[in-house]
Image: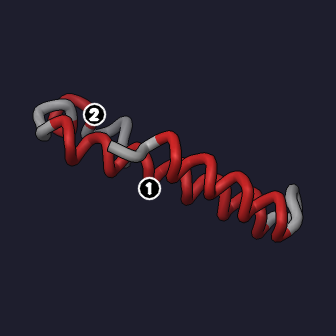
Amino acid sequence: MIEKHRKELEKLPDEIKHEINKCLEIYKELERYDSGDMDISTLEKTLGNILDRYEI
């Protein structure tokens, strides 16, 4: 979906794009956890790092 609508999404305000990027990173890590690529403590640490990085 993102690639299909990239040009339109680029027109969004920076704050919204920032939140979309944060959500996409979180989703990616949850998918990794779901597939068994990481344990719950690693997931917690990774999600904490993502939230810290995207803090405004």
Q: Name the residue under label 1.
A: 23
Residues 42 and 38: in front is 42
- The three-letter amino acid code for the residue at tag 1 is Cys
Q: Pointer 1: residues within 10 angstroms few (<14), some, or many (20+)?
A: some
Amino acid beneath label 2: Arg
Whole-percent x, y for residue 46 in the image:
70, 52
Q: According to the image, label 2 marks what residue?
A: 6
Identity of the residue drawn at 77% across and 64% down: 33
Q: Which labelled disc corresponds to residue 42? A: none
Other-residue count near label 2 (Cα within 10 Å), few / some / many at <14 / 14–19 / ≥20: few
Give the image location of residue 39, x and y in percent.
88, 65
Q: Which comes sooner in the sequence, label 2 or label 1? A: 2
Please tell me whether mark 2 sits on a helix, a strand or a loop.
helix
Q: Please name whichever residue, 55 or 27, is drawn nearer the observer in this view of the structure.
A: 55
- SS type, badge 1: helix
Q: Give the number of the mark in front: 2 or 1.
A: 1
User: In the rendered image, which quarter contains the C terminus?
Assistant: top left
Residue in view at x 55 percent, y 56 percent: 26
Seen from the viewer's position, the closer of residues 44 and 33 is 44
Report the number of discs: 2
Name the residue: 66% across, 63% down: 30
Q: Is residue 24 above or below residue 43?
A: above
Q: Where 46 sits versus 7, above or below?
A: below
* C-alpha separation, residue under disc 2 versus residue under disc 1: 16 Å
Looking at the image, residue 32 sits to the left or right of residue 20; the answer is right
